[in-house]
Amino acid sequence: MTTTTLPTPADLTITPRDRKFGRETPAQRLWHGGRVEATAIYNALSSTFPLGEAFFVESVRKFRDGAPPKLAEEIKGFTTQEAIHSREHDAFNRRATDAGYDLTKLEEQVARRLSITKSKPPIVSLAATMALEHFTAILAHQLLKNAGHLDGADPEAADLWRWHACEEIEHKGVAYDTWLHATRDWTRWKRWSVKARVMLYVTRNFVVDRTAGALELMRQDGVTELNAWARLLWYLWVRPGVFSKIGGAWLKFFLPGFHPWNEDDRDLLRRYEASAAALTAPAPLKKVRNAA
Ligand SMILES: [Fe+2]
Ligand SMILES: [Fe+2]
């Protein structure tokens, strides 16, 4: 049996922040700075979250029995965070629908991909979750590190994406640690080969499906063919170029000894907390005034 050390920081706590976004204001179609391609790719991503995150929760839960107490606690935090993310992205997606988009094709594609994975042994679902959680963590890192990604976006929508990003960083080690625990009896080679193959598979699907989803939404805005491809590819790969910016972090997944917490990016969480605290400051002040 191989032994495993879990480099998740010992003092990390996973805190669900039960927040609600965009319930009071009317839905805006081109919420991302009036830009068709920016709105399309974020809406395409959001359309995957309610089903996708429910799948992550289900996949990790299947392996929680017998987990060490700290990991069991982290799984609880992770599943609560993901359930709240699903709820908020469901609300966000309803607003996109209210604004006139039809997300049906995108959601059907997610359901199709998930049913293929679910037809395989549960460890494959856990591996896919671990790989996709690395994806969301490095995207989240990018989003919080470079404010430019959300430049011009509707403030409440931007707030939703930053809140989600913060929690994705916070729980980025949970699926990975669950995988390490579930495969503790595997050889290093078997672990690496399964996780590498699954990562290549989910990456191909992620890039192809999100691109197709964004193109479909752009089509609904009347932007089609070469014009749509050029604008979307420029946005994703050049400026702000989120996909090319995460390339290096994506590659690290394949290194021997990789662990999501090999990079401790909790400075981004602290920065987020400082700004979020500033945003919510008026509420308690008002309470005090009312009480007085
Ligand atoms: Fe999430
Ligand atoms: Fe997550």
Image (cartoon, grey):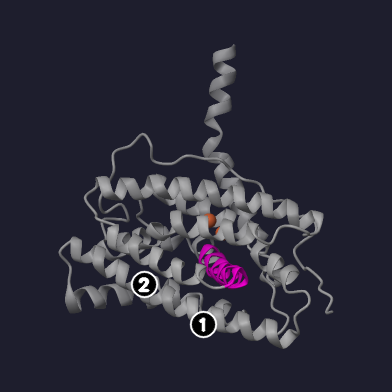
10 Å crowding of disc 1: few (<14), some (14-19), many (20+) = few
Residue 111 placement, left or right of 278:
left
Please tell me which residue is depicted at 31% across the width and 45% down the height of the picture.
95
- Ligand 2 within 8 Å of the CB at mark 1: no
Measuring from the top left, give residue 117's x and y in whole percent: 50, 71
In terms of depth relative to the viewer, which is nearer, 268 or 128? 128
Predominant SS along the magenta part: helix
Callout 1–callout 2 Cβ contact below 8 Å = no
The quarter of the picture where residue 11 lies is bottom right
Please tell me which residue is depicted at 35% across the width and 60% down the height of the picture.
107
- Ligand 1 within 8 Å of the CB at mark 2: no
Where does the magenta region start and end?
121-140
Quarter occupied by the C terminus:
top right
Instruction: Label 1: state its secondary structure.
Output: helix
Instruction: Label 2: state its secondary structure.
Output: helix
The quarter of the picture where residue 206 lies is bottom left
**Which label is found at residue 209?**
2
Residue 30 placement, left or right of 177:
left
Please tell me which residue is depicted at 70% across the width and 65% down the height of the picture.
178
- Looking at the image, tell me whether mark 1 or mark 2 is earlier in sequence order: 1
Q: Does residue 255 appear anywhere in the picture?
A: no
Residue 123 placement, left or right of 24:
right
Measuring from the top left, give residue 205's x and y in whole percent: 42, 76
Residue receiving disc 1: 200
**Label total for image:** 2
**Label 1 to label 2, Cα distance in Å?**
14 Å
Classify 263 as above or below 196.
above
Classify 76 as above or below 151.
above
Type of residue at label 1?
A: Leu
The quarter of the picture where residue 269 lies is bottom right
